[in-house]
Image (cartoon, rainbow, N blue to C red):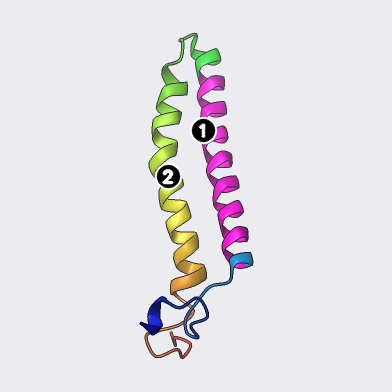
Amino acid sequence: MKSLDKNVVGNTISKKTLRKQYLLSVLLSIGITGTLIGAGYLIDLWQGTTFTYILIGFVISGPLSVWANYSLIKKKFINPLDDFGRPRTK
């Protein structure tokens, strides 16, 4: 089975590119989560509440991080080429 070989020529992504993308995704997720939790903390201080807006920020940061990472990966890996390997035209 040629498709299971390690040296298959085709549409493969290098390990270096995957590492960079993984690091970027992790940093983006940490940044979004930290920003929303920090904003929730400041709102909690201003309102005089305890952990209400921090939890809201934490809950919102999950889907927002997934959406941001998906759109980033889609823009980087899926959009540049169509099924035939030619650049897409707008």
Answer yes or no: do the residues labelled 2 and 1 have beta carbons within 8 Å? yes
Magenta-drawn stretch, dominant element (helix, strand or loop): helix
State the residue at coordinates (40%, 76%): 4
Instruction: Identify which amino acid the numbered label 2 is placed on.
Output: Leu
Magenta stretch encompasses residue 38: yes
State the residue at coordinates (45%, 78%): 5
Check the image and report above or below for 76 versus 42: below
Q: Name the residue beneath numbered marker 1.
A: 36
Instruction: Identify which amino acid the numbered label 1 is placed on.
Output: Leu
Question: Residue 59's x, y, as percent?
Answer: 39, 31
Q: Split into 4 quadrants, where in the image is the C terminus? A: bottom left
Q: Secondary structure at mark 1?
A: helix
Check the image and report above or below for 70 versus 10: above
State the residue at coordinates (47%, 54%): 69
User: How many numbered marks does the figure carry?
Assistant: 2
4 or 58: nearer the viewer: 4
Disc 1 residue crowd, few under 14, some 14–19, many 20+, Cα 10 Å? many
User: In this picture, which residue range is highlighted in magenta?
Assistant: 17-43
